[in-house]
Amino acid sequence: MSGATLDAYLGSHASRGGVLPQAVAQLVRHLAAAALALNKTIEEGLTGVESLNGTNHNASGDAQHALDVHADRLFAEAARKADVAFYASEEQPEVMALQSRGRLALAVDPLDGSSNVDINMSIGTIFSILPALDGAEASFLQEGSNQLAAGIFVYGPQLALILTLGHGTTIFTFSRHLGTFVETRPGIIVPEKTTSFAINMSNYRHWDETVRAYVDDCIKGAEGARGADYNMRWIASMVADVYRILVKGGIYLYPADARKGYSHGRLRLVYEANPVALLMEQAGGCATDGAHRILDLVPEDIHEHVPLVFGSSYEVGKAARYLAAPSEIGLRHPLFGQRGLFSA
Ligand SMILES: O=P(O)(O)OC[C@H]1O[C@](O)(COP(=O)(O)O)[C@@H](O)[C@@H]1O
Ligand SMILES: [Mg+2]
Ligand SMILES: [Mg+2]
């Protein structure tokens, strides 16, 4: 590994001047230390983490794994050490107020892909850093385009940090040899085109006809309307899908469906969709709810769900045409009418 260390990268960001870049750099350093501690626990197979399996639930009704709670504690601790006024987490119903004059608001999915914890699959932490506003909730109910930084720690075969500070997306890999994160993929560009899609196919019967039409055409391959053979990947850890798509291209879809609690999909806007959307856009990719750019949406609730489609820009544009302008494929859309993000 020969790239810049995370510390040097953050130092050069902080030296751009202004108090906010300095505060962001300091916070990312504390988050990286927390991620390192969490990675150690994961590597050791949860030693010392009391099991909560099946006993607790978070604000979205998901069962809390012991590691979800442990990770939440670690990242809240990291936020306390930095210039953070407010901390919002998937694992806590309310926003936590921290420094009264803190400049930043931190939103976190402490552990993404919790269902993969027990099977030694990649999991991760997603974070979004916003400028703190007057009021705890208000600080998180800003459009995602206001984010100062966003990132994902991936606990996988390599411990990685995917980071954007608003000028490109970079992947850092933790070097045991150097004892720090080192830049391994600077200025990533997501391939514009792809023939790889990621969706949980077992939900097929719950989707509306627009989603089915898009997936059907991928599956028809070279003989169908898309004229190419598609491959499918679904890791059930969005963080790992993000990593794969940044490096190889691809499209990820978690649409709304007819199941109870899924009328706006599964992913949360504030601490999942927004940071992923910023990472994608800063790498030349796209993220949409099917009709609108994710980063333009104004959240109404910190735990609000949003249908999410992201990845290679050409493919996301194609999918958005199926979802938002179904008349083009001979369907009527029940949710979004005729508005289309990518259609003329
Ligand atoms: O189990 P499903 O419905 O396929 O959903 C999987 C998706 O849900 C998530 O696990 C949601 O994140 P959490 O694990 O933080 O709840 C994503 O990582 C993943 O892509
Ligand atoms: Mg998640
Ligand atoms: Mg989670």
Image (tube, rainbow, N blue to C red):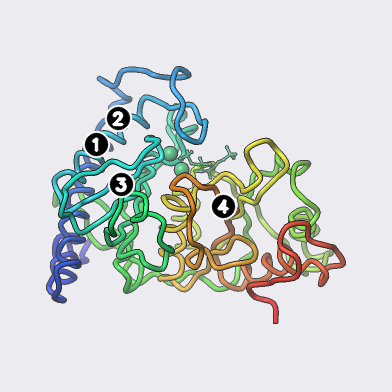
The disc, 4 or 1, on the residue closer to the chain's N-terminal end is 1
Which residue is located at x 59 percent, y 67 percent?
A: 292
Mark 2 in CB contact with mark 1 (< 8 angstroms)? yes
Nearer to us: label 3 or label 4: 4
Cα distance, mark 2 to mark 1?
6 Å
Q: Which residue is mark 1?
A: 74
Q: Which residue is mark 3?
A: 159
Which residue is located at x 61 percent, y 50 percent?
A: 254
Residue 312: percent from the left, percent from the top?
55, 68
* Residue 17 location, quadrant: bottom left
Labelled disc at residue 127: none
Cα distance, mark 3 to mark 2?
18 Å
Q: Amino acid at mark 3?
A: Leu
Nearer to us: label 1 or label 3: 1
Q: Which of these two is toward me, 190 or 92? A: 92
Q: Which residue is mark 2?
A: 70
Which residue is located at x 15 percent, y 57 percent?
A: 26
The disc, 2 or 4, on the residue closer to the chain's N-terminal end is 2
Cα distance, mark 1 to mark 3?
17 Å
